[in-house]
Amino acid sequence: MKILGLDSSGIVASVAIVEDDALIAEYTVNYKKTHSQTLLPMLDEIAKMTELDLESVDAIAVAAGPGSFTGLRIGSATAKGLGLALNLPLVEVPTLEGLAFNLWGTDKLVCPIMDARRNQVYTGIYEFCKEEIPEKESSEHQLVMHSIKEQCAIAVDELVEELNRLGREVIFLGDGVPVYREQILQKLTVPCSFAPAANNRQRAASVASLGAVYYAHGRTVTAAEHEPEYLRKSQAEREREEQEKAAKEAQA
């Protein structure tokens, strides 16, 4: 099984190829360039380096949101275009699940946070649980990622309260960490740590790896069906609505 992974949901742009249990190539850039400038050239580069025939790909896994509105649109448009051109299914990987998968195997709670502005974050709470492999008599187990809290937009203080109620050690990662780290540490009562640079941002390798799991379970859509999941309206839309509301109130 060969999966192409794409993630442009934040500042990071990342492209990866995963085949079965092997990461064939990954190209990740965390720099202030627009993803429209980087995503396709990055894909072209790893295709050249690995002599990849895109027609040999089984599916395209894309970080489906939430995240940067512009980044999500670029990633979705790229995935849809490739899917339509190559007649490939798409696997929609929720952005926070892809981030959490960076810490596969930990026995701690995993809490990815992305800055959603206005003292809010996009977040979810995840854990990895052992499950027996059906029809195997050995002691081998498989780890499965479970969602304790599905991805959502939430106030930072509300998230901290929920983590305190769960009462378990937690690892944070994501671009919301440098923004809200001190606020979290002031109010969190459970042990915590913060993921290191190697895996604290979006990685297409994780999107592709988790995408392979979802693909095996039939969780695919057609390129035409795919739409990014924003979770809430963009800042521009919210500001326009506030202006229109203020104008109506002034006229009343």
Image (cartoon, rainbow, N blue to C red):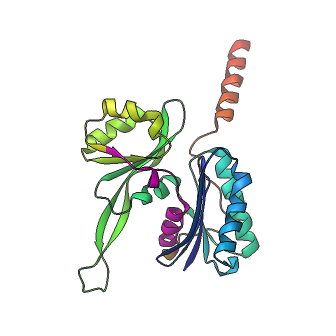
Q: State whether residue 83 is above or below residue 228.
A: below
Residue at the extreme right: 85
Image coordinates for residue 49, horizontal then vertical, percent: 65, 73
Q: Residue at x 68, y 65 (%)?
A: 43
In the image, taking residue 203 as reference, residue 184 lies left or right, namely left
Q: Quadrant of residue 44?
A: bottom right
Image coordinates for residue 227, horizontal then vertical, percent: 65, 56
Residue 205 located within the stretch drawn in magenta: yes
Image coordinates for residue 62, horizontal then vertical, percent: 60, 61
Q: State whether residue 17 is above or below residue 172.
A: below
Number of numbered labels in the structure image: 0
Image quarter where the N terminus lies is bottom right
Q: What type of secondary structure mainly makes up the magenta span?
A: helix
Q: Residue at x 29, y 71 (%)?
A: 131
Q: Quadrant of residue 145?
A: bottom left
Foreground: 133 or 206? 206
**Residue 212 visible here:** yes
Q: Which residues are magenta?
A: 193-215
In the image, taking residue 37 as reference, residue 165 lies left or right, namely left
Residue 207 located within the stretch drawn in magenta: yes
**Residue 223 visible here:** no
Q: State whether residue 249 is above or below residue 116.
A: above
